[in-house]
Image (tube, grey):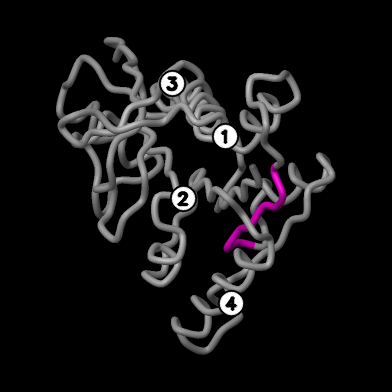
Amino acid sequence: MRAVVMVSGGGTNLQAILDAVRDGKITNTEICGVISNRTDAYALERAKKAGIPAVCVSRKAYATRAEFETALLAAVDSLKPDLIVLAGFLVIIPAEMIRRYERRIINIHPSLIPSFCGDGFYGLHVHEQVLARGVKVTGATVHYVDEGTDTGPILLQKAVAVEPNDTPEVLQRRVMEQAEWIILPQVIDAIANGRVSKDSNGNWFVTM
């Protein structure tokens, strides 16, 4: 399976994927490219260190949103992926890409969807809201991408405890270490090895 990882920032989830491929936790998978929308994304450097083709498609380089989306889709198509992994990619995915790659795009979100998701819930903002609301359990979710924001079918979730003295930064790190970096590689491996199915209610699930 050929997988493209799309990321806007530091690429910690990308690194978790690369490490899992190296360690044999993700099998039958080649990370065939990394795409970012930011020239300064450290994820691009991680890709280069791993010998993986990396490209930046920046909105700033195009006069219109439509031109940017055309370029972004062309960059994805050129890599001929079987799976697209959104690992902290803070760009609305073009509708044409979602249609072309239906059920072949997954996203990692740092909460237990449907809590703390949708417009405006990304990165540290999620953890700030978790703490402001006073919930005792948070976590992460891997889901298929559809044309809504965090509304696609859920594939796998993992819960993480919220501790009394947490700051958003401390909680963010714990959710990464105890959930995101674990379940994202698990789902990629499951997809690569045909272990994703639908139950009788139409819900998707991953077999370990």
Task: Identify the residue at horizontal 24%, vertical 48% (top origin).
Answer: 151
Give the residue type at disc 4. Ala
**Other residues around mark 2 within 10 Å, as few (<14) / some (14–19) / many (≥20):** some
In the image, which is nearer the foreground, mark 4 or mark 1? 1
Q: Main secondary structure of the magenta part?
A: strand
- Of the numbered discs 2 and 4, the one sitting upstream in the chain is 4
Mark carried by residue 104:
2
The residue at the point 44 percent across, 44 percent down is: 106
Q: Which residue is mark 3?
A: 179
Question: Which residue is found at the position 33% from the left and 27% from the top?
Answer: 205
| Residue range corresponding to the magenta coloring | 31-38
Which residue is identified by label 4? Answer: 71
Q: Is residue 110 visible?
A: yes
**Mark with earlier residue (1, 2):** 2
Q: Of callouts 3 and 1, which one flags the residue occurring earlier in the amino acid sequence? A: 3
Pick the front one: 134 or 15: 15
Q: Amino acid at mark 2?
A: Arg
Which residue is farthest front? 200
Q: Which residue is mark 1?
A: 192
Residue type, numbered disc 1: Ala
Callout 4 crowding tier (Cα within 10 Å): few <14, some 14–19, many ≥20: some
Q: Earlier in the sequence, mark 2 or mark 3?
A: 2
For the residues marked 2 and 4, what is the alpha-carbon distance in whole angstroms? 19 Å
Assign a secondary structure to mark 2.
loop
